[in-house]
Image: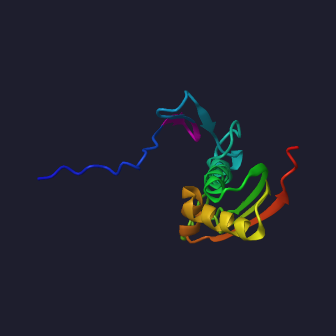
Amino acid sequence: MTAVRPKQTVVPFVVHSEGTGVFQTLRPEGDAGHVFTADAYPAFGGADSAPSPLFFALGSLTSCNQVTASLVAKDLGIRLGRWTFEVRGDLDTAVLVGGAEGNANFDRVQVRATVETDATPEQFARLVSETARRCPVTQLFERSGLEFTNDWTPVALPDAG
């Protein structure tokens, strides 16, 4: 029998966590010693002492888009500068809190991004579409079945000279 070998390009991401009630401390494995915590609003049984896991989910969407777009921009030969994001996730809490039948996922997530760039309109359109295709977190949201809006606006990159 031949041993199954993992792909050379697969990188495992492992998080160890522990907690009490709805509060949790998380430690990424192999990371630079980062530790983060998550809690919930009092309405969900928490003390609101740390961001909700739902905020982490939305925040990971902005961060992963920025990382992925930086890789894509390098491939396209364009420069990127300052970013701003606003992400809104609409969550009906009837399933989460009330136990109703249905899907506990966000109903809708809207991403609005503004990025400084020297890209032409065609390059920017390619940047946006290729980032959406290559970003693991965007793909998690898009493939989950929720209504997903991804609206990016380019702003002229300030002259470096």
| Residue 156 in sight | yes
Q: Is residue 146 left or right of residue 13?
A: right
156 left or right, relative to 71 = right
Instruction: Please tell me which residue is depicted at 78% across the width and 49% down the height of the picture.
Output: 81
Residue 146 falls in image quadrant: bottom right
Work out which residue is located at the far top of the displayed protein and give it.
Answer: 33
Picture coordinates of residue 103 (x, y %)?
Answer: 55, 68
* Number of residue marks: 0
Task: Relative to 146, say whether 14 is above or below.
Answer: above
Q: Nearer the viewer, residue 75 or 24?
A: 75
Visible in this render: residue 95? no
The prevailing secondary structure element of the residues shown in magenta is strand
Q: Which residues are magenta?
A: 16-24
Split into 4 quadrants, where in the image is the C terminus? top right
Work out whether residue 5 or residue 49 is closer to the camera in this orientation and state it. Answer: 5
Q: How is the image coloured?
A: rainbow
Which corner quadrant of the image does residue 118 belong to?
Answer: bottom right
- At 26% across and 49% down in the image, what residue appears? 5
Q: Of 56 and 69, which appears nearest the observer?
A: 69
In this rendering, is residue 134 above or below 60?
below
Position of residue 41 measured from the top left corner of the image (x, y, whole percent): 70, 46
Residue 80 place in picture, x, y as percent = 74, 52
The reply to whether the magenta stretch includes residue 101 is no
Query: Quick check: is 20 in the magenta stretch?
Result: yes
Query: Residue 74, how many percent across, how many down?
Result: 63, 52
Residue occupying image coordinates x 54% and y 57%? 136
Give the residue at the far left of this rendering. Answer: 1
